[in-house]
Amino acid sequence: MSQTSSTQIQLVRRPSGWPTHEDFRTVTVPYGDLEPGQVRVRNEFVSVDPYMRGRMNDSRSYVAPYALGETITGGAVGRVVESAADEVPVGAVVLHQHGWTDVIQADAGTFRVLADVPGVPLSVRLHILGMTGMTAYVGLTEIAGLKAGDTVFVSGAAGAVGTAAGQIAKLLGAKRVIGSAGSAEKVALLTEKYGYDAAFNYKDGDVRGQLAAAAPEGIDVFFDNVGGEHLEAALEAFNDGGRAALCGAISAYNATERPAGPDNMPNLITRGLTLRGFTLGHYLHLAPEFTERMTGWFAAGSIAYDETIVDGIEHTVDAFLDMMRGANTGKMLVRI
Amino acid sequence: MSQTSSTQIQLVRRPSGWPTHEDFRTVTVPYGDLEPGQVRVRNEFVSVDPYMRGRMNDSRSYVAPYALGETITGGAVGRVVESAADEVPVGAVVLHQHGWTDVIQADAGTFRVLADVPGVPLSVRLHILGMTGMTAYVGLTEIAGLKAGDTVFVSGAAGAVGTAAGQIAKLLGAKRVIGSAGSAEKVALLTEKYGYDAAFNYKDGDVRGQLAAAAPEGIDVFFDNVGGEHLEAALEAFNDGGRAALCGAISAYNATERPAGPDNMPNLITRGLTLRGFTLGHYLHLAPEFTERMTGWFAAGSIAYDETIVDGIEHTVDAFLDMMRGANTGKMLVRI
């Protein structure tokens, strides 16, 4: 048993528009000896994700807002360094939701012990084999009803969810997969590394025209991480019976005024389209199915991925803001 | 056998915005003796419907545009006055799609002979027991997945589809049904005759606020005939897991510029909402189920309805325009 201190990031003010450093504070939290049933975990990787922006607002959503003055919670993986709980021993690798801290001490029940999978780096449990990979899988299968032969469009395709979605779509039999991203480098990566058949840079403008050119026969499935213009473009490109899985709307997260919606909503009627929003929390029953399939694909070498790593818990806010601006390729992570 | 002439309404110019009389012409079409296999039908009621506005445009939709210089097709019921086809004898009551004409002569196969149902007026086959009733039924059940206990909101609730939808929702176990309409008289009718629990006049403005006041516990199902502000208001009022059946967007049909979409589309994600557009043509396999249930409800006296009747084929365009402006309560029909 020992005492230690941890460095934690807390929300102290609700951001208006783009968050700034003044909305957060870094605090040192001391931990005393473990209580019976507790463990102490040293994090190795901490996740920063788009959905966290929504939790910084005090508004109705699928998860409660972050409380001011408390440490920001979210996905992280680490190793147990002390234990007063037999079921979570020292050395165990654990996944948890304690979030933006280098060390966390809490009841053993709040940590999930991960079986060691040879050849799977720990960080991957926070994305391809974790929440972001499962988000891509559930969105394509359960929400959008992807069928073999479909043409699929993924917006924000170079992000953590988007890189997974394109590859999963192909593995599930999509005929053609089209992605959008925010730089020429990312666009190149989509076709060269991630199996996209076509890709374009949405910062070049005319998303509608670029999508139409990339999908001359229309699209059947849209996996949306961006919203706004991308959704409008998809509504224009949809074939009859098209289905959208709305996963994110990063274009709107930092808006201080509500952006206007698509001007072509009546296409939903004339083409028999379905738009369905989702968040993973309602689909956790699909975790065994996802894990089995994704582990198989991963082991077969069918899954590429990128990580954008920022070192040091003290740079977590920078990592979060960079991710919101699209500075990452693949999954943005903070390495402790 | 005999010769006759018919009065038919044709589209001669594609309307820009609101149609005008100059977009149509009335012609006299002579018919000679019947060919073998043909029948001659004298219409009793001709239908004018919102979807016809879409067919007047030369744009991609679920049905082909009306051809210029041809008679406008659509639902009608009439009686066979001459027959050269044994299976469709003189005196038979028929439903057909030959549209805006007082007399039609065509192959017997293009007419469906209706069994006489005691107590069911012929006109009802064009709405409650016909396409509009089935549209309401399919939208609530197959598209929106209505469950007992749901709170349902119907926009444009005093129209042909809306008056059916409110009653069907209650018969299927909805806890609370809320409707919007465009006049104080219609609003009163919704609660007094059609079983709506609450109703409001959308021409008073603030659709969002009026809906929120009428649905203090939120809505689970939205049956949309109007689009625009109504859809935006519903997205704000939806409970988690809410479902919309998008049936019509009459607010947009005569717009010359595309109206902006809802400013709150991200609610789809945070609340796990589904928006699904539909047109009846893809759900005709549900006709036997619909007919059985609706005939039962009708026979039990559970279904109220209104008709707004305009007399004379020469007034069909006026009837159509009045319907688009909301001058009708219940189903707008032309009586020949």
Image (cartoon, coloured by chain):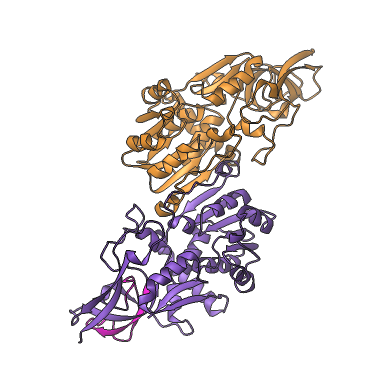
Chain colours: A orange, B purple
Q: Position of residue A7 (x, y in %)?
A: 72, 16
The tally of labels here is 0
Vertical order, B100 against A232 (above or below)? below
Instruction: Locate the N terminus of chain A by quadrant.
Output: top right
For the point 67% across and 39% down, the residue is A59
For the point 44% across and 25% down, the residue is A303
Residue B321 can be seen in this image: yes
Give the side of residue B59 with respect to residue A226, left or right.
left
For the point 50% across and 47% down, the residue is B261
Compare residues A332 and B43 and report the one nearer the observer: B43
Q: Which image quarter: residue A97? A: top right
Q: Which image quarter: residue A36? A: top right
Magenta segment, which residues? B76-101
Q: Position of residue A39 (x, y in %)?
A: 74, 21
Q: Position of residue B249 (x, y in %)?
A: 47, 56
Q: Position of residue A266 (x, y in %)?
A: 45, 52
Residue B84 in magenta stretch: yes
Vertical order, B104 against B15 (above or below)? below
